[in-house]
Amino acid sequence: MAKQPDRTDPILEVSDLDCFYGDLQVIRQVCFKVLDGDVVALFGPNGHGKSTLLKTIGGIHPTANGSVRFRGQDITQAPVEQRVEMGLVYIPEDKNLFLDMSVLENLCMGAFNKRARKHLATGLQFVFSLFPRLAERKSQSAMTLSGGEARMLAIGRGMMSRAALLMIDEPSIGLSPLLKKTVFEAIRQIHSNSEASILVVEQEVDYPLKLAKRIYLLSKGRIVLEKQAGEINKAQIEKAYF
Ligand SMILES: Nc1ncnc2c1ncn2[C@@H]1O[C@H](COP(=O)(O)OP(=O)(O)OP(=O)(O)O)[C@@H](O)[C@H]1O
Ligand SMILES: [Mg+2]
């Protein structure tokens, strides 16, 4: 019989991570974990290393020291494609869409890995139910989408990969209040429908605070605060920024 997932197991464990750009150290001795099935929010001011941390976990930026374990396996040196095949997927801040392809083609590219390919049709159905706007524009070139639509497409493409852990970098950046709500509602549904674990990086505190079970704050490349949801409120997080 298949082993049931133990919700106290970490799906992601980051230990003593250091990262550099040339001589500039951006991530310093970072340790944190995401338990299987949880939503974790990582907050922090501009330029303090949030995206670098996600890129390093995703295999896009190299690790100088420390380790990353995913589902119990050391993946510190694993290439990006291997991490994606294992179910670790990063949705970057800058969207990174295939601009010369249509909405539908971009979504299909998200399901390129072996695990996701056989669930293409149900994946598309789920994305279109969360973002009907993408269904209306499925033949349209990604280049011509509005900022909000492009962000929906980036999140939708990440969802198509059937990630076990979805890392989402500032999903609400630059969006109207209404679209922010739509995007976080979609993230809530991804979590409840697919049982994916989610690591969301944000500056916007309200919505992630409602979703997350665990909160981390990154400042000057270090984790300076770690709390269970309910142990901290918005004002305390914002105060800790400064
Ligand atoms: N490719 C790069 N080369 C050199 N320095 C970089 C590079 N990318 C980022 N940095 C620097 O590393 C630091 C951390 O950047 P990072 O993008 O990780 O921050 P962030 O917390 O995601 O910021 P934001 O909230 O603005 O997205 C910044 O000082 C930035 O200037
Ligand atoms: Mg960033």
Image (spheres, rainbow, N blue to C red):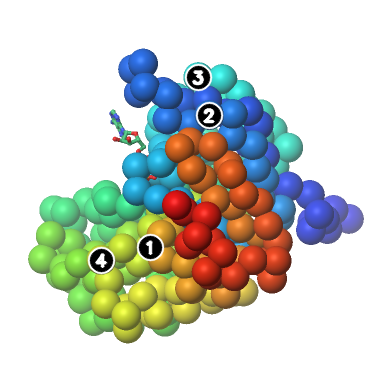
In this rendering, the answer to whether 96 lies above or below 78 is below
Q: Position of residue 123 (x, y in %)?
A: 46, 68
Kindly report the distance in space between the C-alpha atoms of the residues bearing marks 1 and 2: 25 Å
Q: Position of residue 40 (x, y in %)?
A: 60, 58
Q: Hey, what amino acid is under mark 2?
A: Arg
Q: Position of residue 204 (x, y in %)?
A: 41, 66
Q: Earlier in the sequence, mark 3 or mark 2?
A: 2
Quadrant where the N terminus sits is bottom right
The answer to whether residue 162 of the structure is visible from this angle is no
The mark lying in front, picked from 1 and 2, is 2
Label 2, secondary structure: give it.
Answer: strand
Q: Name the residue tied to disc 4.
A: 174
In this rendering, the answer to whether 26 lies above or below 34 is above
Q: From the viewer's perspective, is 90 left or right of 209?
A: left
Label 3, secondary structure: give it.
Answer: loop
Q: Earlier in the sequence, mark 2 or mark 4?
A: 2
Depth order, front residue of 140/172: 172
Q: In the image, what residue occupies the spot 34% across and 42% down?
A: 47
Q: Name the residue tied to disc 3.
A: 64
Q: Name the residue tied to disc 2.
A: 28
Count of marks placed on residues: 4
Kindly report the distance in space between the C-alpha atoms of the residues bearing marks 4 and 1: 9 Å
Q: Earlier in the sequence, mark 4 or mark 3?
A: 3
Q: Name the residue tied to disc 1.
A: 171
Extreme top residue here? Answer: 23
Give the quadrant of ligand 1: top left
Disc 4 crowd, CA 10 A, few/some/many (<14, 14-19, 20+): few
Q: Hey, what amino acid is under mark 3?
A: Ala
Q: In the image, what residue occupies the spot 16% across and 54% down?
A: 99
Q: In the image, what residue occupies the spot 65% across and 42% down?
A: 32
